[in-house]
Image (spheres, rainbow, N blue to C red):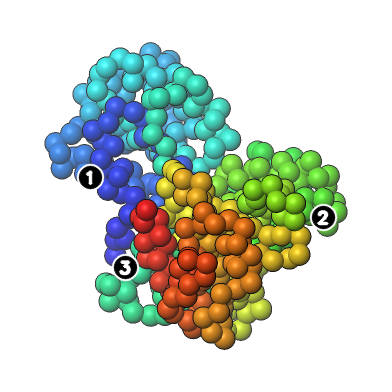
Amino acid sequence: MKIIRSVFAELAREISRPEVSILLGPRQVGKTFLLCELQKNARKKNLRTRYYDLELPSDLMAFNKTDAEIFRMLTQNVDVVFIDEFHYLKNASRIFKAIFDSHKKIKIFVSGSSSIEIHKHIKESLAGRRLTTRIAPLSFDEFSQKARKGEAANLFEEYAVYGGLPGLIHAPDASSKIRILNELLAAYIQKDVKGLVKEENIRAFNNLIYLLAENQGSLISENSLAGEIGLTAATVNRHLSILDNTYVCHAVHSYSRDLGNELKKSKKIYFYDLGIRNALLKDFGTLSRRSDKGAIHESFVFLQLVCALKPNMEIKFWRNKSGQEIDFVLLKDRRPFLIEVKSSLPGREILPAMKIFLANYPETAGAIVFSENQAGTEEFLGKTVRFEPLSSAYNAIQTIMSSK
């Protein structure tokens, strides 16, 4: 079964553009699959293509040449070049710039898993010469193609427990999914992190990511984390930066307009996939048995937001010093829209934190509350507050993002 990725159509349109198209994201989110599909699309247009996977020794050896020789290799008798894990290519930015500036009309697609490595290669020389797309795991809408193709299991439960990594789609059973997730975690520590973290800090790094998984969606303090794992706050900050730059964690910062009672420097951390988080916790129990069900629901909605985010949008959260909190403030052209997640609600009552926020920020476009058991709308101060089921989060978010 092949899942149609929503990002594919936009990437396919980039075939006719001269900029270097860069696909970024953590391991196993489908970057290689997208490059292969793009190659098929280019061939259907009768374009000559060439594909290199630089994690294959034979392909990497082909680039063991001078820059001038590589330039000729990538520009002769070809229209579209695909390079997977391109950060292994030395002087990549210089070579790509030379191809772009030569007006040879060669299109280049590349992929990478670490922005730390990539920034070493893609410097100012590619400013205005690149198109960057961050690839996420499957959205719930993409994952739900399983149901449309005859697999009508409890998809929401499966997605919440095992996540949306495309490689799990064909896993025959739960034990296979768990094995794949554990192997991905091990590969991340061994390949992406080991060269970035001092050997003596690897264990502390492992403890850090466990604590982050355990406290996903909660306010974090670098000083508190440092005390728990025996590192300095500066080292914890560096490790959080590594998690961000290898696309494994998303940091969400607080929203404020300089009101005196708002938290301004706090942040929350979410892992890029629920299955990876559950693998870290070694907990693949059903939602009905889990004490962290609320955190899973909140994380689920956050990941759907990430999948649908546009360049003019940003995700933050809001909390005041009295403890009133909004899970997510979606900023669209700097105008806030409120998103709250509750596992269950006694009724369609507008939450106190929403009332406070709407009273202080009259420019707010509206609000939505996701839960398992409420649907409908309410009004407050002229703003519409929608109540939607959790399973419809992706489609509801798409509607929010496409509205004016």
- The answer to whether residue 387 is above or below residue 259 is below
Check disc 1 and give the amino acid type.
Lys
Q: Quadrant of residue 283?
A: bottom right
Residue type beneath disc 2 = Ser
Q: Tell me the residue at 49%/31% (across/down).
A: 88
Q: Which numbered marker is on residue 40? A: 1
**Mark 3 in CB contact with mark 1 (< 8 angstroms):** no
Between 38 and 236, the one lying in front of the other is: 236
* Disc 2 secondary structure class: helix
Cα distance between the residues tagged 2 and 1: 50 Å
In the rendered structure, which disc, 3 or 2, sits on the residue that comes first in sequence? 3
Is residue 166 visible in the rendered structure shown here? no
Q: Distance between the residues labelled 3 and 2?
A: 42 Å
Can residue 3 be seen? yes
Q: What element carries label 1?
A: helix
Task: Name the residue: 15% across, 42% down.
Answer: 44
The reply to whether callout 3 and callout 2 are in contact (CB within 8 Å) is no
Alpha carbon of mark 3 to alpha carbon of mark 1: how far?
21 Å
Q: Quadrant of residue 227?
A: bottom right
Would you name the residue on which mark 2 appears? 224
Of labels 3 and 1, the one closer to you: 3
Q: Is residue 191 above or below residue 347?
A: above
- Return the mark for residue 145: 3
Residue at x 66%, y 42% (from the top left corner): 241
Residue 133 drawn at (x, y percent): 41, 42
Q: How far across and how far down the image is residue 126, in percent?
A: 44, 23
Residue located at (54% from left, 37% from top): 115
How would you rate the neighbour count of disc 2 (Cα within 10 Å): few for under 14, some for 14-19, many for 20 or more? few
Q: Which residue lies furthest to the bottom in this view?
A: 346
Q: Relative to residue 186, is residue 49 drawn left or right?
A: left
